[in-house]
């Protein structure tokens, strides 16, 4: 029995050593420390530009949309960006065409452009963007770049685990798995750049009774936290031949 125990302890030591060896000298392995540094890094962001790809993973992917967005946002208030300019294309399940819209606002005027209909909607009311607003919130925003306490829920979650490293769009990242302190124990896998601790990917997992969890992924590319802004960066730029109205977008 003692011999078997020694073998098991040796194997455990080798396994732990191999796991720790995934981190290079000077790199972090404490998931809470990584999350705290990510929290501080995101708090320092005032304006950010990035490309974001959204997709559902697993068996649900075939009946879910995929999106590709270019996002410019600044500030956050009332659960929305204060200023934004977002260009998005959506691939619906089974469709060959990709609906394309642009939405934005500079804090005074807000707009949405339906490029397929060649129609723009603009008004002082942010609700003028209509259903495009919901698509922005679901498919285009990485809100951790904007909110006051970006990773409070992750730091105070039920559990945190460092699972190694992975390269995302050329960026070497720490990978941290978080189980949130929610009733259904939602979880997420976060990928933080080792260079600046800003997130490059998140994979959310939502448990479902008697079914595989629902999983969705947001991946960030071409991240710029110091974008050069034109004076009209958040204003409507009406393409030639498009109609404009102050009606609300559908």
Image: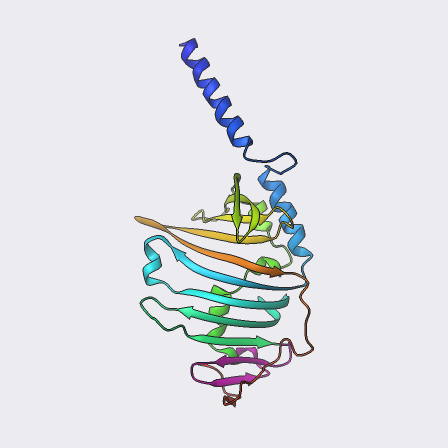
Residue 9 in view of the camera? yes
Identity of the residue drawn at 55% across and 59% down: 221
Specify the quadrant that holds the C terminus: bottom left
How many marks are shown on the rendered structure?
A: 0
Name the quadrant containing residue 90.
bottom left
Q: Is residue 117 magenta?
A: yes
The quadrant holding residue 220 is: bottom right
Residue 206 located left or right of residue 49: left
Residue 63 within the magenta-colored segment of the rendering: no
Considering only vertical position in the picture, is 121 above or below 36? below
For the record, the magenta segment spans 106-127
At a point 35% along the width and 58% down the height, the residue shown is 61
- Residue 114 position, x and y percent, is 46, 80
Q: What color scheme is it? A: rainbow
Residue 59 at x, y = what percent?
32, 54
- Residue 183 image point, x, y percent: 45, 48
Furthest-top residue in this view:
2
Residue sticking out furthest to the front: 170
Q: Look at the image and tell me in which quarter the N terminus lies.
A: top left
Q: Is residue 17 left or right of residue 65?
A: right
**In-front residue for pair 147/115:** 115
State the image quarter where residue 235 is shown: bottom right
Residue 24, position in %: x, y? 60, 35
Residue located at (53% from left, 26% from top): 17
Q: Answer whether residue 78 is visible to the viewer in this image.
A: no
Is residue 203 positioned above or below 245 on the image?
Answer: above
Please tell me which residue is depicted at 53% across the width and 88% down the height of the picture: 240
């Amino acid at each position: 029995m003692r011999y078997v125990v020694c073998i098991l302890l040796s194997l455990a030591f080798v396994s732990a050593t191999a796991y720790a060896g995934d981190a290079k000298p000077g790199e972090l392995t404490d998931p809470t420390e990584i999350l705290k540094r990510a929290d501080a890094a995101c708090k320092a962001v005032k304006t950010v530009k990035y490309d974001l790809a959204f997709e559902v993973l697993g068996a649900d992917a075939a009946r879910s949309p995929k999106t590709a967005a270019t996002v410019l946002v600044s500030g956050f208030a009332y659960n929305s960006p204060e200023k934004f300019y977002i260009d998005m294309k959506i691939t619906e399940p089974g469709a060959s065409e990709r609906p394309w819209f642009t939405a934005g606002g500079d804090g005074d005027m807000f707009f949405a452009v339906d490029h397929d209909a060649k129609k723009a909607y603009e008004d002082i009311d942010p609700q003028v963007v209509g259903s495009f607003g919901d698509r922005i919130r679901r498919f285009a925003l990485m809100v951790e770049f904007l909110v006051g306490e970006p990773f409070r829920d992750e730091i105070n979650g039920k559990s945190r685990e460092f699972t190694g490293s992975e390269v995302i769009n050329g960026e070497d990242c720490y990978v941290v798995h978080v189980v949130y302190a929610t009733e259904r124990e939602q979880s997420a896998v976060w990928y933080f750049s080792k260079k600046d601790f800003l997130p490059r990917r998140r994979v959310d997992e939502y448990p479902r009774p008697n079914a595989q969890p629902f999983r969705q992924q947001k991946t960030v590319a071409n991240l710029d936290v110091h974008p050069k802004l034109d004076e009209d960066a958040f204003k409507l730029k009406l393409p030639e031949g498009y109609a404009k109205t102050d009606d609300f977008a559908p």
